[in-house]
Image (cartoon, helix red, strand yellow):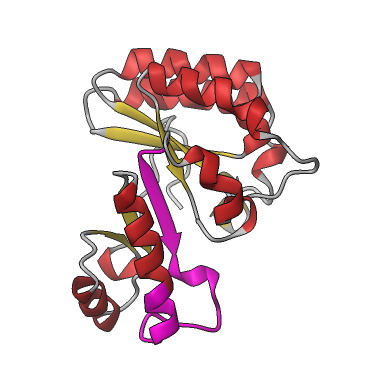
């Protein structure tokens, strides 16, 4: 979800600042545009947003509208103002999974998505994303980074999740990812993402 500014389309400084009705309405508009056109649609939410009843209802409504397209909720690493216990999240996570909504763990190893925080979520998640760009000191050519990638790759495999490696920016990175046996990958090396216009009047850049 991005906002149009004087510098073009930019993500919000904090997703927490987005009002629940805006998120819910945007979800519904997007669903109407994408139904039967793609295999899945993802939405990024933090833990506090996932606990919001209005957003929960919108997610379930959108999944019902999208079938057979899958709705994927990407749980972000964004820090919360107050700790959120697993006991608060579990009933809602179970409800989503029962309705066919998939849970993706975004930017694992950082923020709220460090291993100690996401361990209870592992049996429920369908997807895990590791972003190389989150470590400014190490590149994929470094053996230490490759060791980290292998750890998360193997953890995802243990729980039968899709593992997506993000931040591939060169042919050298692409070859290293081949050697690591990772099929799902993202990065500017493969092309930049394109914006979906919800309204005909929406700016293109």
Asked if residue 142 is among those painted magenta in the image, a careful observer would answer yes
Give the percent coordinates (x, y) of residue 176. Answer: 25, 78
- Describe residue 34's horizontal placement relative to residue 112 as left or right: left
Q: Is residue 188 visible?
A: yes
Give the camera-side residue of 47 and 144: 144
Give the camera-side residue of 198 and 175: 175
Q: What range is drawn magenta here?
A: 125-147
Give the percent coordinates (x, y) of residue 126. Answer: 35, 39
Quadrant of the image occupied by residue 179: bottom left
Give the camera-side residue of 138 and 32: 138
Give the percent coordinates (x, y) of residue 147. Answer: 39, 76
Question: Residue at 38% across / 39% down in the picture?
Answer: 196
Q: Residue furthest right?
A: 82
Quadrant of the image occupied by residue 70: top left
Figure check: 19 above or below 149: above
Figure check: 101 above or below 125: above
Give the camera-side residue of 151 and 204: 151
Figure check: 129 above or below 29: below
């Amino acid at each position: 979800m991005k906002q149009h500014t004087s510098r073009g389309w930019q993500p919000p400084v904090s997703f927490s600042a987005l009002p629940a009705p805006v998120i819910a309405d945007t979800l519904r508009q997007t669903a109407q545009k994408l139904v039967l056109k793609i295999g899945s649609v993802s939405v990024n939410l933090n833990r506090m947003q996932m606990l919001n009843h209005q957003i929960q209802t919108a997610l379930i409504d959108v999944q019902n509208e999208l079938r057979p397209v899958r709705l994927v909720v990407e749980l972000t690493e964004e820090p919360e103002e107050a700790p959120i216990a697993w006991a608060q999240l579990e009933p809602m996570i179970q409800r989503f999974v029962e309705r066919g909504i998939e849970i993706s763990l975004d930017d694992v190893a950082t923020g709220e998505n460090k291993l100690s925080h996401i361990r209870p979520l592992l049996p429920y998640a369908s997807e895990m994303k590791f972003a190389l760009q989150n470590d400014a000191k190490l590149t994929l050519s470094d053996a230490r980074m490759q060791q980290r990638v292998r750890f998360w790759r193997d953890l995802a495999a243990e729980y039968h999740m899709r593992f997506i490696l993000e931040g591939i920016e060169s042919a050298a990175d692409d070859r290293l990812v081949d050697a690591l046996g990772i099929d799902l990958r993202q990065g500017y090396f493969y092309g930049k993402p394109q914006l979906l216009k919800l309204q005909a009047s929406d700016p293109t850049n």
